[in-house]
Each structure stands twice: as structure tokens, then as C-alpha cells.
Amino acid sequence: IKNHSGGHITTQEAAELVRTIDRELGSDHIKFYPGVSYRHLLVLKGGKFSANVECTPPHDVLGIPIDRVLVRAKDAQSKKIAQILNKLILDSASILEQHPVNVKRNHQGKDMANMIWPWSPGKKPVMKTFQERFGIKGAVISAVNLIKGLGVYAGFGIMQVKGATGLYNTNYEGKADVSLAALEKYDLVFVHVEASDEAGHEGNVNLKIKTIEYFDQRLVGRVLGGIHEKVRIALLPDHLTPIAVRTHVADPVPFLIYDPEKTGDEVREFNESSCSRGSLGLL
């Protein structure tokens, strides 16, 4: 695997590829749905399918031959589905390699999106909404369909932001403005920003610094400047994506909780070193 994002293929290009794959490899029980950029949806319908398979995140295995990281069954019952998924992977290569979208990208010197890659299998959940469990009405803002999907199941309102891309060039100001507007209607607004993670996967330190600066100045700063009531704010990174390894690691992440009714601690900078000395300690 050379590039887990197909060179950050555009949503329009990807939609053409996914529609072709669905036409060529789909069936009554196997459906492909286009999403955003390189993230899409494969739905397997019917009781014969098992989600008990291991699919390796592609950004974890850059440079590794695919035959070493294909789908693996976790039990005897899931062997059939692993075989089906691996056949879809291999069959997709011959279809996508010669697709006009990829031929054009190749001529332009761009990476091609020339193979599908199943990633993070699961079954449709049955769950209570966030409001049913906690009595809190929430909304979510994200360019990533995975996060939007979690919001749907949590019963959150899905806020749309024009120009939100999930990359460094996302509409930071738009996310800030929509979040401020959402606070008029919702008790909790979850704003998700993917840009710094993508820069980490690319191994681009300058871009990662820039995305953090953009997040600070254009989103957080704008939200703080637009709040005119008592609001609690939390900054919660979900994981580290170090430039050196270009994938997720399980080291502690810095986090921040602001409550206008409580006294803060002595931390004055938001980084791993400073936050490790915060009043909440290491959780």
C-alpha cells in the first residue's frame, strides 16, 4: 500500500470509481455507496455475513505488500466473509487501474485510487440515543461520514458546513459559526476536525503545525470570541498520530476542560508536556 487516501482523491472522482465498482462487483447482497474523498461504505446484506473479521487500517501498513495484510477470519464462521472481501479487493484492482479517473490522475502525476480496501467492519447497532440516556440534546459537526454516522445513532442533529473537507483546507470559520448557531438550539455541540490527523498520516510536519495553528486561531478563537453565555468547552484529541511513524499510537493525549464557574490550574499552554502537569493529572 503506497497511499491510504488515494492521493486525497476528490469526492467527485471517488464517486465515479465507487459507482463503477458497485456496477461491476455489487449484487443484491453487496452494495457500495460513495462517501467523501477516500472514505466510502460497503454494505453486506443478509444473515450469512459475519463481522468477525480483522481488516487492517491501510495507514498502519504503508509500504507493506497487500498479501501480508489482507482480511483475516477470527473464527471458522467468518472464513467465508474473509474470502469474499479479499476477492472484492483483488477484483477491484483490474477494474480501477484502467478507469478513466485513474488514467487521468496517473498522467497528472497523482497517486491512483486503484484498489478498494475494507476497513473497520461492524454490524448495524441497536442503541439508545444520547438524549434518552443522559437527557442532553446534542449536535455534531464533521466532514467525516464515520463521525456523522455515530451522531445519527446517538440521535444528534447533523449540522452541515459548506466547504468542510476533513483536510487542512477545511472551512474552520464555517465550523465555528455553525457551532455557535447550534448552541442556541442544542445543549451539546461536538465539533470534529480531522486535518491534523491527516497531516500526521502524510508525514508532513509543516502541514501539521499549520493545521494546529488554523484550529487554534480560526476555529477555537472564533468560538471563544462569539460566546456570550456560560458554556463549558473541552478539547479532546482521540489519539496521537506522530510524524515519525505516520500512524496512530496509544500514548497519552493532552486535553483541556474549561468551566467558567470554576478556578483553573497553573497550565498556560496546550501541549503534551504542559497538560501532563495539569490538575487532572494523567487519566
Image (cartoon, rainbow, N blue to C red):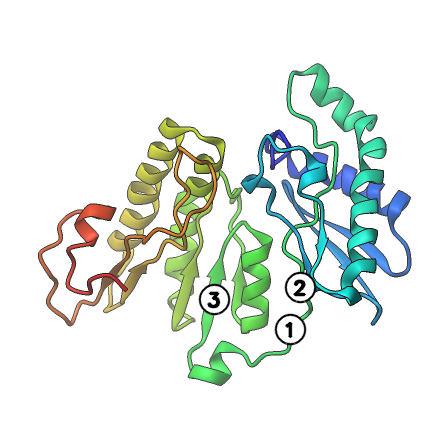
Badge 1 or badge 3: first in the primary sequence: 1
Q: Tell me the number on the disc at residue 122.
A: 2
Tell me the residue that label 1 is attached to: 125
- Looking at the figure, which quarter contains the N terminus? top right
Q: Tell me the number on the disc at residue 232.
A: none
Residues at circles 2 and 1 in contact by the CB criterion of under 8 Å: yes
Q: Amino acid at mark 1?
A: Pro
Tell me if 214 is positioned left or right of 269 in this view. right
Badge 2 or badge 3: first in the primary sequence: 2
Q: Amino acid at mark 3?
A: Ala
From what the image shows, is residue 157 above or below residue 98?
Answer: below
From what the image shows, is residue 34 above or below residue 246?
Answer: below
CA–CA distance in space, label 2 to label 1: 8 Å
The secondary structure type at the circle numbered 2 is loop
Tell me if 107 is positioned left or right of 277 in this view. right
Tell me what residue is drawn at x 49 percent, y 39 percent: 167
Q: How packed is label 1: few (under 14 Cα within 10 Å), some, or many (20 or more)? A: few
Q: Is residue 168 visible?
A: no
The secondary structure type at the circle numbered 3 is strand
Tell me what residue is drawn at x 22 percent, y 63 percent: 258
Q: How packed is label 2: few (under 14 Cα within 10 Å), some, or many (20 or more)? A: few
Tell me what residue is drawn at x 65 percent, y 16 percent: 109
Percent x, y for residue 255? 28, 56
Q: Tell me the number on the disc at residue 139.
A: 3
Percent x, y for residue 16? 78, 38
Q: In front of the other: label 1 or label 3?
A: 1
Tell me what residue is drawn at x 71 percent, y 50 percent: 71
